[in-house]
Image: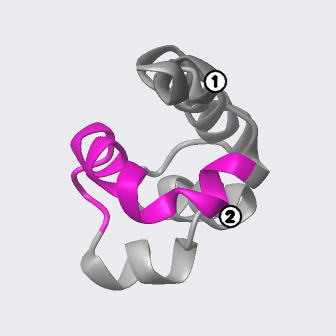
Amino acid sequence: MNWDQIEGKWKQLTGSARERWGMLTDDDWQTIGGKKEQLIGRIQERYGIAKAEAEKQADEWSHAQKQSQPDDHLAARL
């Protein structure tokens, strides 16, 4: 799933993101708002990791969301 889609579906996806990065606070989640750079920055800050590692984690998570979301055109047929 690309980050424009993630930003549009952020409220639905926040639960999955909270499971992945449990150290982020409610304020962090509100600030992030589905924006990749905000998420990367908060992951770096809370977990004390390099930007490249935080970006890798965010990208892996976003790709996993694509796999877990049903295809919109298939859902419309059901």
For the residue pair 10 and 59, the one nearer the viewer reads as 10
* Residue in the picture at 59% in, 32% down: 62
Which residue is more in the foreground, 73 or 38? 73
- Which of the 4 image quarters holds residue 39? bottom right
User: Disc 2 vs disc 1: which is toward the camera?
Assistant: 1
- In the image, residue 45 sits, relative to residue 57, either above or below, namely below
Q: Residue 50: where, in percent of width, then height?
A: 64, 42
Q: Residue at x 63, y 24 (%)?
A: 73
Of callouts 2 and 1, which one flags the residue occurring earlier in the amino acid sequence?
2
Q: Main secondary structure of the magenta part?
A: helix
Neighbour tally class for label 2: few under 14, some 14-19, many 20 plus, Cα within 10 Å: some
Task: Provide the residue designation for mark 1.
Answer: 73
Q: Amino acid at mark 1?
A: His
Residue at 31% over, 64% down:
24
For the residues labelled 2 and 1, the Cα–Cα distance comes to: 25 Å
Q: Quadrant of residue 19?
A: top left
Tag 2: amino acid = Lys
Q: Is residue 47 left or right of residue 34?
A: left
The N terminus: image quadrant: top right
Q: Is residue 32 left or right of residue 52?
A: left
Colour style of the rendered protein structure = one colour
Q: Write down the quadrant of residue 57 in the picture.
A: top right
Identify the residue under disc 2. 35
Identified at 31% across, 38% down, the residue is 20
Quadrant (top left, top right, bottom left, bottom right) of the C terminus: top left
Magenta-drawn segment: 5-24
In the image, residue 48 sits, relative to residue 75, either above or below, namely below
